[in-house]
Amino acid sequence: MSSVMDDPTLERHFKGHRDAVTSLDFSSNMKQIASGSVDACVMIWNTRPQMRAYRFVGHKDAVTCVQFSPSGHLVASASRDKTVRLWVPSVKGESTVFRAHTGTVRSVSFSSDGQTLLTASDDKSIKVWTVHRQKFLFSLNQHINWVRCARFSPDGRLIVSASDDKTVKLWDKNSRECIHSFCEHGGYVSHADFHPSGTCIAAACTDNTVKVWDIRTHKLLQHYPVHSATVNSLSFHPSGNYLITASSDSTLKILDLLEGRLLYTLHGHQGPASCVSFSRTGEFFASGGADEQVMLWKTNFDSVDYSEVLEQKGARDEKASVHSSYRGPSAQESGAAGQSSQKSSSTAPVSPGAGQPDSVPAALASTLQHIIGQLDVLTQTVAILEQRLTLTEDKLKECMQMQRQSVSEN
């Protein structure tokens, strides 16, 4: 495998939104991209050629965040209208809606098992819900200003939240307590997320920088002053080796976390780039901006053989068979080796699933995933039917009352 990197390439433009694109996400099978916009619509773009897009209308104000469920059979959207909607991403575009907060809902996020939903709002709260029936479980309330973003850790045990109160908070989901607060002095954090290994978090800041913190030692691992305007969004490559950012300076930046350096600057959007996301495999990434466009890019550079990089850094003698599933040093090893160079070896990842026994056959795993997806759809269908039944009952009551009135009048 060659260690020469290929540059990312712009594959497609998607045009259909009538205002700035605020958020986007890939489905697990890479066949669809969901996007939200200030135009109050959710769009589902089909990545296969000649497949038409779906426009979902329902929100009464700007859509601030969208995310596919892990199975890809649901899309959650958050809005300035204070509601969250769960959509079935098909041509009918059926959805259930619930009033989640008393202020703008800024963020919505599924847990990795697809059973729980996390929302964050201008009402200063973070709330946790069941996906089935959208039952409220609990809220986290220590922020003293708008909460811009909240995300589950890969294992679902922790939550990270970013607020205009200039803090990024780390929460224990089970005890519901704030474990640590990372304080920002230059500005607030507009977006935060967990590294795929779950050992550190990255924050996109309004002071034009990107920061990476270790959640075990609470130390700042890396600091990237690479943008000339607010950083609006970021996304980790599934391998954990790269971080991509979107900024109001209209650029996307790709950061090499192992080397601790800027790798690429991409110019594509006219005006601010508002959101960016890698696909589940890392083969593609998508970006959205104030120019109302969604752009699909092919990654290309992630095929580098990282065994050569590891040899240069002296982190390990054994060579990894890398591509997208590079297995980096363990947390303890990277901490020991982190004295050299730019601290970047501290963020050397273990890819999702690395080191786990391959006890479940691929065919069985695929079948189970399909069953889970079908259950998602059934759950959603039942919820929609329940809503319709309630409406029918209400109309029936109205008809009976009107009939009684007409009988009594006669």
Image (cartoon, rainbow, N blue to C red):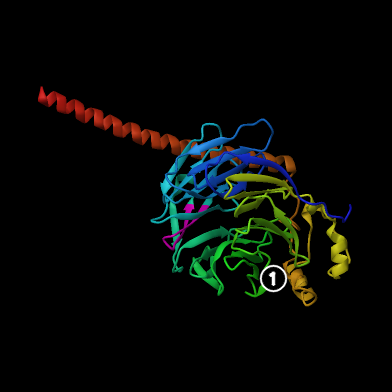
Q: Main secondary structure of the magenta part?
A: strand
User: In the rendered structure, which segment of residues is drawn in magenta?
Assistant: 117-129
Question: Which quadrant holds residue 207?
Answer: bottom right
Residue 315 among magenta residues: no
Could you classify mark 1 by the number of other residues whose Cα lies within 10 Å: few (under 14), some (14-19), or many (20 or more)? some
Front one among 68 and 321? 68
Residue under numbered circle 1: 222
Q: In this view of the protein, which residue sits in the foreground, 108 or 378?
A: 108
Query: Farthest residue toward the bottom?
Result: 339
Looking at this view, name the residue that lies furthest to the front. 270
Callout 1: helix, strand or loop? strand
How far across and down, in percent of the image, does residue 410 sit?
A: 10, 22
Asked whether the viewer can see residue 343, the reply is yes
Please name the residue shown 72% across and 67% down the image: 347
Residue 337, given in percent of the width and then of the height, sits at 79, 74
Residue 125 part of the magenta segment: yes
Residue type, label 1: Gln
In the rendering, at what x and y percent does residue 43 appear?
55, 40
At x 78% / y 63%, what residue is drawn?
328
- 23 left or right of 82? right
Side (left or right) of 409 relative to 236: left
Quadrant position of residue 261: bottom right
- Give x and y (percent) for residue 186: 56, 73
Above or below for 18 versus 156: above
**Position of residue 202 in the picture relative to residue 120 (left or right):** right
Instruction: Report the side of 312 relative to 346 (left or right).
Output: right
Task: Name the residue rendered at 63%, 70% in the picture.
Answer: 215
Instruction: Please name the residue shown 53% across and 36% down the image.
Output: 55
